[in-house]
Image (tube, rainbow, N blue to C red):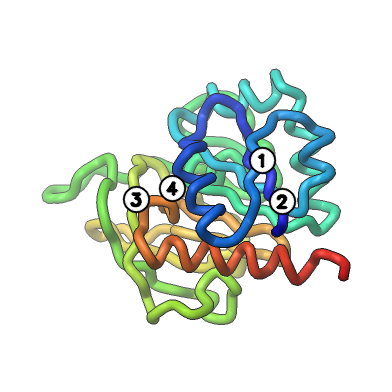
Amino acid sequence: MPVIAVVDYEMGNLHSVCKGLEKAGATPNVTYSPKELEQADAIVLPGVGAFDPAVQHLRSRGLEQPIKEAIASGKPFLGICLGLQILFESSAEGTQPGLGIIKGKVRRFRPEPDITIPHMGWNQLEVTQPKSILWEHLPSDPWVYFVHSYYVDPIDPLIRAATITHGTQTVTAAIAHENLMAVQFHPEKSSNIGLQILSNFVAQVREKIPA
Protein backbone atom coordinates (compact mmCIF):
# COMPACT_ATOMS: atom_id res chain seq x y z
CA MET A 1 0.00 0.00 0.00
CA PRO A 2 1.23 3.53 -0.68
CA VAL A 3 2.67 5.35 2.32
CA ILE A 4 1.17 8.81 2.75
CA ALA A 5 2.79 11.25 5.16
CA VAL A 6 0.19 13.14 7.19
CA VAL A 7 1.87 16.34 8.37
CA ASP A 8 1.71 16.82 12.13
CA TYR A 9 2.05 20.47 13.12
CA GLU A 10 -0.46 20.49 16.00
CA MET A 11 -3.25 21.91 13.82
CA GLY A 12 -4.92 18.92 12.20
CA ASN A 13 -7.71 16.43 12.80
CA LEU A 14 -5.16 13.66 12.31
CA HIS A 15 -7.15 10.67 13.57
CA SER A 16 -10.10 11.17 11.21
CA VAL A 17 -7.84 11.86 8.24
CA CYS A 18 -5.77 8.76 8.91
CA LYS A 19 -8.88 6.60 9.23
CA GLY A 20 -10.13 7.92 5.90
CA LEU A 21 -6.81 7.21 4.19
CA GLU A 22 -6.72 3.69 5.63
CA LYS A 23 -10.21 3.00 4.28
CA ALA A 24 -9.04 4.37 0.92
CA GLY A 25 -6.26 1.78 0.83
CA ALA A 26 -3.21 3.73 2.00
CA THR A 27 -0.84 3.51 4.95
CA PRO A 28 -0.83 6.88 6.73
CA ASN A 29 2.29 7.99 8.58
CA VAL A 30 1.74 10.90 10.97
CA THR A 31 5.02 12.80 11.02
CA TYR A 32 6.82 16.12 11.27
CA SER A 33 10.09 14.68 10.01
CA PRO A 34 11.36 16.29 6.78
CA LYS A 35 13.12 13.01 5.95
CA GLU A 36 9.88 11.03 6.25
CA LEU A 37 8.08 13.58 4.05
CA GLU A 38 10.77 13.03 1.43
CA GLN A 39 10.50 9.23 1.69
CA ALA A 40 6.68 9.07 1.56
CA ASP A 41 4.81 8.34 -1.65
CA ALA A 42 2.53 11.35 -1.08
CA ILE A 43 1.74 14.05 1.46
CA VAL A 44 -1.51 15.15 3.09
CA LEU A 45 -1.57 18.49 4.93
CA PRO A 46 -4.69 18.67 7.12
CA GLY A 47 -5.59 21.66 9.24
CA VAL A 48 -8.08 22.94 11.78
CA GLY A 49 -7.74 26.29 13.51
CA ALA A 50 -6.28 29.72 12.77
CA PHE A 51 -3.93 30.79 9.99
CA ASP A 52 -1.11 32.44 11.98
CA PRO A 53 -0.49 29.60 14.47
CA ALA A 54 -0.57 27.11 11.61
CA VAL A 55 2.19 28.75 9.58
CA GLN A 56 4.18 29.48 12.73
CA HIS A 57 4.06 25.81 13.77
CA LEU A 58 5.06 24.67 10.29
CA ARG A 59 8.03 27.00 10.24
CA SER A 60 9.12 26.21 13.80
CA ARG A 61 9.30 22.53 12.81
CA GLY A 62 11.30 23.28 9.69
CA LEU A 63 8.56 22.01 7.39
CA GLU A 64 8.05 24.92 5.00
CA GLN A 65 10.93 24.11 2.65
CA PRO A 66 10.37 20.31 2.64
CA ILE A 67 6.72 20.87 1.68
CA LYS A 68 7.69 23.25 -1.12
CA GLU A 69 10.34 20.83 -2.38
CA ALA A 70 7.93 17.88 -2.31
CA ILE A 71 5.34 19.75 -4.36
CA ALA A 72 7.98 21.00 -6.80
CA SER A 73 9.26 17.42 -7.24
CA GLY A 74 5.85 16.25 -8.48
CA LYS A 75 4.93 14.24 -5.40
CA PRO A 76 1.13 13.96 -4.98
CA PHE A 77 -0.04 16.47 -2.38
CA LEU A 78 -3.45 17.02 -0.81
CA GLY A 79 -4.29 19.95 1.45
CA ILE A 80 -7.44 19.87 3.59
CA CYS A 81 -9.28 22.94 5.00
CA LEU A 82 -6.63 25.08 6.72
CA GLY A 83 -4.11 22.95 4.83
CA LEU A 84 -5.47 24.60 1.67
CA GLN A 85 -5.42 28.15 3.04
CA ILE A 86 -1.81 28.16 4.25
CA LEU A 87 -0.63 27.33 0.71
CA PHE A 88 -1.57 30.92 -0.24
CA GLU A 89 0.40 34.14 0.17
CA SER A 90 -1.58 35.76 3.00
CA SER A 91 -4.84 35.66 4.94
CA ALA A 92 -7.29 38.22 6.25
CA GLU A 93 -7.37 36.09 9.40
CA GLY A 94 -3.82 36.97 10.42
CA THR A 95 -0.60 38.84 9.71
CA GLN A 96 1.85 36.03 9.02
CA PRO A 97 2.84 35.30 5.41
CA GLY A 98 1.54 32.04 4.06
CA LEU A 99 3.69 29.52 2.21
CA GLY A 100 3.11 31.36 -1.07
CA ILE A 101 2.98 28.17 -3.11
CA ILE A 102 -0.21 29.45 -4.73
CA LYS A 103 -0.60 33.10 -5.72
CA GLY A 104 -3.61 34.70 -4.05
CA LYS A 105 -5.14 35.55 -0.70
CA VAL A 106 -7.45 34.09 1.89
CA ARG A 107 -10.53 36.25 2.45
CA ARG A 108 -13.37 36.32 4.99
CA PHE A 109 -16.99 35.83 3.99
CA ARG A 110 -18.93 39.09 3.85
CA PRO A 111 -21.74 39.25 6.39
CA GLU A 112 -25.16 38.95 4.77
CA PRO A 113 -28.70 38.59 6.08
CA ASP A 114 -29.71 34.96 6.52
CA ILE A 115 -26.27 33.37 6.20
CA THR A 116 -24.14 31.97 8.98
CA ILE A 117 -20.45 32.64 9.52
CA PRO A 118 -18.72 30.29 9.95
CA HIS A 119 -20.11 28.45 6.96
CA MET A 120 -20.82 25.13 8.62
CA GLY A 121 -22.50 22.01 7.28
CA TRP A 122 -23.24 20.41 3.93
CA ASN A 123 -23.03 22.33 0.68
CA GLN A 124 -23.10 21.34 -2.96
CA LEU A 125 -19.97 21.64 -5.04
CA GLU A 126 -20.10 23.26 -8.45
CA VAL A 127 -17.35 21.35 -10.23
CA THR A 128 -15.25 23.53 -12.55
CA GLN A 129 -12.61 20.93 -13.46
CA PRO A 130 -14.75 17.91 -14.33
CA LYS A 131 -11.72 15.93 -15.54
CA SER A 132 -9.81 16.30 -12.27
CA ILE A 133 -9.02 12.99 -10.59
CA LEU A 134 -10.63 14.40 -7.42
CA TRP A 135 -14.11 13.93 -8.87
CA GLU A 136 -13.79 10.51 -10.52
CA HIS A 137 -16.62 8.04 -9.78
CA LEU A 138 -18.69 10.80 -8.14
CA PRO A 139 -22.13 12.17 -9.02
CA SER A 140 -22.09 15.59 -10.65
CA ASP A 141 -21.90 18.47 -8.16
CA PRO A 142 -21.68 16.31 -5.00
CA TRP A 143 -22.47 17.42 -1.44
CA VAL A 144 -19.60 17.72 1.05
CA TYR A 145 -19.09 19.01 4.61
CA PHE A 146 -17.60 22.43 5.45
CA VAL A 147 -16.52 24.33 8.57
CA HIS A 148 -14.86 27.68 7.73
CA SER A 149 -15.14 31.46 7.96
CA TYR A 150 -12.48 32.18 5.33
CA TYR A 151 -12.03 31.10 1.73
CA VAL A 152 -9.19 31.12 -0.78
CA ASP A 153 -9.11 33.52 -3.71
CA PRO A 154 -6.48 32.34 -6.23
CA ILE A 155 -5.15 34.82 -8.80
CA ASP A 156 -5.25 32.14 -11.51
CA PRO A 157 -8.91 31.07 -11.91
CA LEU A 158 -7.89 28.02 -13.93
CA ILE A 159 -6.64 26.19 -10.83
CA ARG A 160 -10.15 26.19 -9.32
CA ALA A 161 -11.48 22.64 -9.32
CA ALA A 162 -14.80 23.47 -7.65
CA THR A 163 -16.75 26.35 -6.13
CA ILE A 164 -19.63 26.69 -3.67
CA THR A 165 -22.27 29.36 -3.15
CA HIS A 166 -22.98 30.65 0.36
CA GLY A 167 -25.60 33.37 0.39
CA THR A 168 -24.80 35.49 -2.67
CA GLN A 169 -21.09 34.67 -2.56
CA THR A 170 -19.57 32.08 -4.87
CA VAL A 171 -16.11 31.08 -3.68
CA THR A 172 -13.39 28.53 -4.36
CA ALA A 173 -13.95 25.17 -2.66
CA ALA A 174 -11.10 23.15 -4.22
CA ILE A 175 -8.04 23.65 -6.35
CA ALA A 176 -6.10 21.26 -8.57
CA HIS A 177 -2.98 21.78 -10.63
CA GLU A 178 -0.83 18.85 -11.73
CA ASN A 179 0.24 16.99 -8.54
CA LEU A 180 -1.11 19.64 -6.16
CA MET A 181 -4.69 19.31 -4.92
CA ALA A 182 -6.39 20.96 -1.97
CA VAL A 183 -9.95 21.25 -0.69
CA GLN A 184 -11.71 23.63 1.68
CA PHE A 185 -14.17 20.99 2.84
CA HIS A 186 -13.46 17.96 5.02
CA PRO A 187 -13.46 14.74 2.98
CA GLU A 188 -12.98 12.75 6.20
CA LYS A 189 -16.36 14.12 7.39
CA SER A 190 -18.14 13.89 4.03
CA SER A 191 -19.39 10.29 4.20
CA ASN A 192 -19.08 8.12 1.10
CA ILE A 193 -18.41 11.11 -1.16
CA GLY A 194 -15.42 12.12 0.94
CA LEU A 195 -14.10 8.56 1.07
CA GLN A 196 -14.28 8.38 -2.73
CA ILE A 197 -12.31 11.62 -3.01
CA LEU A 198 -9.62 10.20 -0.73
CA SER A 199 -9.69 6.97 -2.75
CA ASN A 200 -9.20 8.99 -5.95
CA PHE A 201 -6.16 10.67 -4.41
CA VAL A 202 -4.74 7.32 -3.30
CA ALA A 203 -5.31 5.91 -6.79
CA GLN A 204 -3.24 8.74 -8.25
CA VAL A 205 -0.49 8.02 -5.73
CA ARG A 206 -0.43 4.36 -6.76
CA GLU A 207 -0.01 5.32 -10.40
CA LYS A 208 3.13 7.28 -9.58
CA ILE A 209 4.84 4.51 -7.58
CA PRO A 210 7.49 2.82 -9.74
CA ALA A 211 6.66 -0.80 -10.55
What residue is pinned by disc 2? 3
Label pair 1/3, CB-CB below 8 angstroms:
no
Left or right placement of residue 16 versus residue 109 in this view: right
Give the SS element for disc 4.
strand
Quadrant containing the N terminus in the rendered view: bottom right
Residue type (three-letter) at the residue carrying disc 2: Val
Ranked by sequence position, the earlier of labels 2 and 1 is 2
What residue is pinned by disc 1? 29
Give the SS element for disc 1.
strand
What residue is pinned by disc 3? 146
Ranked by sequence position, the earlier of labels 1 and 3 is 1
Give the SS element for disc 3.
strand
**Residue nearest the viewer, comparing 149 with 195:** 195
Left or right placement of residue 156 versus residue 169 in this view: right
**Front disc: 1 or 4:** 1
Ranked by sequence position, the earlier of labels 3 and 4 is 3
Residue drawn where x is 65% and y is 50% of the image: 27
**Front disc: 3 or 4:** 3
Residue type (three-letter) at the residue carrying disc 4: Tyr
Disc on res. 151: 4
